[in-house]
Image (tube, rainbow, N blue to C red):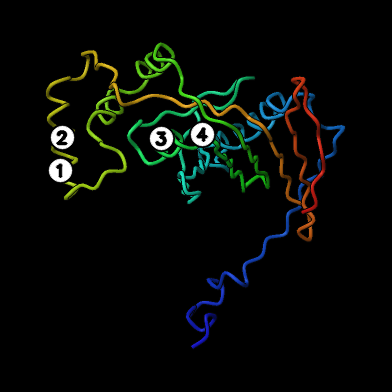
């Protein structure tokens, strides 16, 4: 049996999957001077697409990290803030990604906005957010999410789903709806300060537009076009 024979429906064969991108092109003259200003433009487009139901969770990004031996791992998280200093997400500091960032702070982010034929790829260095900034965001989370931050020992092995549900129920009884939930000491944010930011625009015949900002020692940015 060949790999292709495994698929009873030919439409399910990944080798046969094709999508022709019809989007308009991307030129250097289209770009803002600073990559975060350009990201703002594209994020607003993605957010509008989400409002109209054509794109799901525009702030979802794939975070890739590596351990001290260079072995990579990836997962999808939600970006909760971005500004000229970088991109912020929150997590358990005992999680795999946080442990890897502790020994190797270099990370990559990918915003996969496939429905609008765009991607943004970031490389940069991660630093923890301050506790005051973390506490302010934690207080803005729904009560259930605050409880969940305590209940889940993220990335650790557990015996069953029941173990997790029981921990959540116990904490929910300790901190019922309407009561303040303390900020867990093991929970907080990371800010990825970008070193490169690539804007990928899908084009016909796989001849995509790729324009990459690279940070310079003087604080400026250069922009280069990459071959697809």
The residues bearing labels 1 and 2 have C-alpha atoms spaced at a distance of 6 Å
Q: Is the residue 182 above or below the residue 120 in the image? A: above
Residue that badge 2 annotates = 167
Q: Are marks 3 and 4 in contact (CB under 8 Å)?
A: no
Distance in Å between CA atoms under marks 2 and 4: 31 Å
Q: Residue furthest top?
A: 132
Quarter occupied by residue 177: top left
**Where does label 1 land, which residue?**
163
Nearer to us of marks 3 and 2 is: 3
Mark 3 to mark 2: distance in Å? Answer: 22 Å
Q: Earlier in the sequence, mark 3 or mark 4?
A: 3
Q: Which residue is mark 4?
A: 105
Q: Secondary structure at mark 1?
A: helix
Cα distance in 3D space between marks 4 and 1: 32 Å
Q: Are marks 1 and 2 in contact (CB under 8 Å)?
A: yes
The location of residue 149, given as percent across then percent down, is 29, 29
Q: CA distance from mark 3 to mark 1?
A: 23 Å
**Residue in the picture at 46% in, 20% down:** 129
The correct choice, above or below, for 122 with respect to 17 in the image is above
Residue 21 lies left or right of residue 165; in this view the side is right
183 to 95, vertically: above or below? above
Up the image or down, 110 lies above or below 218; here it is below
Please name the residue that numbered disc 3 is placed on: 98
Category of crowding for the residue at label 4, using alpha-carbon neighbours closer than 10 angstroms: few (below 14), some (14–19), many (at least 20):
some
């Amino acid at each position: 049996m060949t790999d292709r024979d495994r698929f009873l429906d030919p439409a399910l064969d990944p080798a046969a999957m094709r999508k022709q991108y019809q989007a308009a092109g991307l030129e250097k003259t289209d770009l803002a001077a600073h990559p975060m200003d350009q990201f703002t433009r594209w994020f607003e487009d993605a957010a509008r697409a989400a409002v109209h139901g054509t794109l799901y969770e525009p702030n979802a990004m794939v975070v890739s990290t590596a351990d001290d031996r260079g072995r990579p791992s990836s997962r999808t998280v939600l970006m909760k803030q971005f500004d000229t200093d970088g991109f912020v997400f929150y997590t358990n500091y005992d999680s795999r990604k946080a442990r890897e960032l502790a020994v190797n702070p270099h990370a990559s982010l990918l915003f996969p906005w496939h429905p609008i034929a765009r991607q943004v790829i970031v490389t940069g260095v991660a630093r923890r957010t301050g506790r005051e900034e973390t506490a302010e965001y934690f207080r803005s989370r729904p009560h259930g999410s605050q409880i969940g931050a305590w209940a889940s020992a993220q990335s650790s092995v557990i015996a069953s789903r029941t173990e997790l549900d029981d921990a959540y129920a116990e904490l929910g009884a300790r901190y019922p709806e309407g009561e303040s939930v303390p900020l867990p000491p093991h929970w907080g944010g990371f800010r990825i300060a970008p070193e490169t930011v690539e804007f990928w625009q899908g084009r016909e015949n796989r001849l995509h537009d790729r324009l990459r900002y690279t940070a310079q020692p003087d604080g400026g940015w250069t922009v280069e076009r990459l071959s697809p």
